[in-house]
Each structure stands twice: as C-alpha cells, then as structure tokens.
Image (cartoon, rainbow, N blue to C red):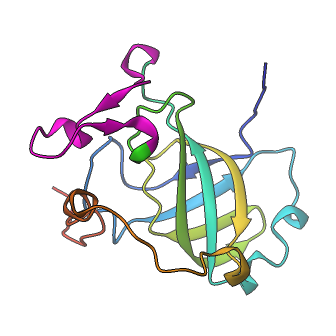
Amino acid sequence: MIELNPIGFIKNTRKEIRDDHWGDIESEIVLTKQFSPEALAGIEEFSHAEILFFFHQVPPEKIQIGSRHPRNNSGWPKVGIFAQRGKNRPNRIGSTIVRVIDCKGTHLRVKGLDAIDGTPVLDIKPIMAEFLPKEKIVQPTWSHEVMIDYWDTTPED
C-alpha cells in the first residue's frame, strides 16, 4: 500500500475536464497548511517546474488498464494506456512541465498546467536541463495529431 497526501491544490478558471486549449491557463498552486513558505524557497529561480497531480474526477470504473484508441478516436491506433497520456490511468497521476510565473509565500503561480480547479497536487519538481533527454525525442504521427489543439490559446467558451 502506498499512501500519498496532497501537498497543495490547484486554483484556476478551468472547472471541468476538457482535452484542448490549455495554452493560456494560469494556475495558482496553494500548498497545504503543513508547509511554510520555506518549502518553495528558490523555485522562482527556475523557469519551469514539473507538477505531479491526481486526476481526482476520474471515477475508478473509468480506469483503463489495457489498450484503447487515444481520445476514443478510432482513426488513431489502439495503444496501451502507458503509451499515451490520458487521464484514465491506473493510478490517475498526471504530470506537466509548466512555466513558473512567480511565487509568494505558499502560493506558486504557473502557466500551462493542464489540470482543473481543485486538483490535488502530489509534488513539485524544478526542471533542470540535466534531467531532460539528451537525444532527439521520437514519437508516432498520431501523437502529434492528438496534440494539435492541446496548447492552443483559443479562449474558453
């Protein structure tokens, strides 16, 4: 048994899960009361951070453990849940690299976090060039198609 407790929660304007248009979303990560501002000291010196979060609105019965078409689009190949970044993962853990905007006390403002308001945050890690891939990143064509509008900055409805 692994027990995880949120270190904070996300505050932003996105109230419901949607697949696309995350580019302009600014979020505030508010740490829980157990943390003091010391926990975030120095994070603003990094341009980017990786946010690990829990897909809390995915019901257990929607979890995928095998393969499926990304976004249920039969035009894309059926691939395993670990060969895609869908939210219906076995442990419902999400991960996104975000731009750090600023940090005030126990509040971290970021841009490009694809998680909705109220999402529990599991961890925050600074992005260091030494941890990024050294080789060219290779991915299948369908994955580029999935992402065409993902970071689009089209205003929300």
Identify the image quadrant of residue 3.
top right
**Image-quadrant location for residue 38:** bottom right
Q: Is residue 5 magenta?
A: no
Q: What is the number of callouts on the image?
A: 0
Among all residues in the image, which is located at the extreme left? 75
Where are the magenta residues, as a range? 60-82
Compare residues 20 and 37 and report the one nearer the observer: 20
* Residue visible at 82% across and 79% down in the picture: 42
x 78%, y 25%: residue: 2
Image quadrant occupied by the N terminus:
top right
Where does the image place residue 71, in percent across and percent down from the top left? 23, 41
In the image, farthest residue toward the top: 61
From the viewer's side, name the closer residue of 6 and 88: 88
| Percent position of residue 150, x then y | 27, 62
Residue at point 35% right, 64% down?
139
Q: Is residue 64 above or below residue 139?
A: above
Residue 14 pos. (x, y %): 36, 51
Image quadrant for the C terminus? bottom left
Q: Is residue 62 above or below residue 106?
A: above
Please tell me which residue is depicted at 20% across the width and 43% down the height of the picture. 77
- Locate residue 69, reporting x and y percent: 22, 37
Left or right for 3, reference 152: right
Above or below, 60 against 120 in this view is above
Q: Is residue 64 left or right of residue 79?
A: right
Q: Is residue 66 left or right of residue 147?
A: right
Q: Is residue 86 above or below residue 44?
A: above
